[in-house]
Amino acid sequence: MAHVPAAERRPQLIKAAIDLMTREGVAAGSTRAIAAELGVAQTTVHYTFGSKEDLYRAVMDQITDELVARVQRAAPANAGFEETFSAFAGALWGTVREPTSHHQLLSELTMFALRVPGLNEARQGHYRRVIEVTAQVITETAERTGQELTESPETVARFFLSGFDGLTMQVLVALPDETAEQRGLQALVAATVALAKGTLDLPDVPTA
């Protein structure tokens, strides 16, 4: 069998891992099973990535890249602040609702990474990047539309993502209710825009 360079084998193994775990779950993603999915020896996985954790990290990066690219393409060029952010949120929600987007697999991997010390850095890096991309969208949209922000873009991004993650978990673990989900998303977008503009009334909340 002809030798395949690691640089060429790497994306093949990442795709095989994504295909396998999307179909059968993260627990099925052993290096042996991933190697069998591609039809190569198990040693090929370790030669290319070093460890299963390194492969999982690459899978998380790949899926994140795909989702970020999709969401960034959705932003309208000449719309106002609220319309642009609504389009951004709608595109992101589309990745939750569309099975082929791998959003569910990314959520599973993120939860799995909580229990794997070798994946802790990958999990933090993934979420840090999601916050940065969201904050960048908010910043660029505000600059383009002339919208003054009363909170930092990162604060607005974290607020939005915390609510979005909650809506996502409801889809993944609860009975689907598209009407309630859509209303929840609309309310989240409205609250996020109000926070960004300074029109959201924030009460004092006791923390102890």
Image (cartoon, rainbow, N blue to C red):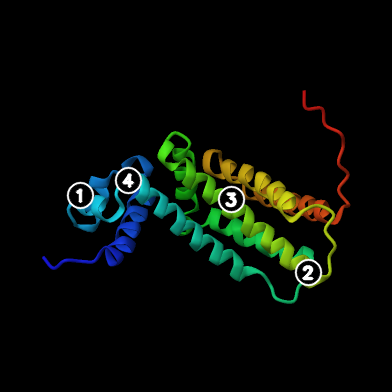
Is 47 placed left or right of 129 in the picture?
Answer: left
The three-letter code of the residue at mark 2 reads Glu
Q: Are circles 1 and 3 on residues that touch, CB within 8 Å? A: no
* Mark closest to the chain's N terminus, 1 or 4: 1
Label 3 element class = helix
Is 74 placed left or right of 146 in the picture?
Answer: left
Examine the rendered structure and indicate whether residue 121 appears above or below residue 96.
above
The three-letter code of the residue at mark 4 reads Lys
Residue 165, quarter of the rendered image: top right
Between marks 1 and 2, how big is the CA–CA gap? 51 Å
Q: Residues within 10 Å of mark 3 (few under 14, many from 20)?
A: few
Q: Are circles 1 and 4 on residues that touch, CB within 8 Å? A: no
* Mark closest to the chain's N terminus, 4 or 3: 4
What residue is shown at x 45% (from left), y 49% (from top)? 105
What residue is shown at x 30% (from left), y 65% (from top)? 7
- Residue 128 has which mark? 3
Q: Residues within 10 Å of mark 2 (few under 14, many from 20)?
A: few
Residue 72 position, x and y percent, is: 60, 67
* Mark closest to the chain's N terminus, 4 or 2: 4
The residue that mark 1 highlights is: 42
Between marks 1 and 3, how big is the CA–CA gap? 32 Å
Q: Residues within 10 Å of mark 1 (few under 14, many from 20)?
A: some
The residue that mark 2 highlights is: 143
Q: Residues within 10 Å of mark 4 (few under 14, many from 20)?
A: some
Between marks 4 and 2, how big is the CA–CA gap? 42 Å
Residue 123 position, x and y percent, is: 50, 45
Question: In the rendered view of the protein, which quadrant contains the N terminus?
Answer: bottom left
The residue that mark 4 highlights is: 52
Label 2 element class = helix
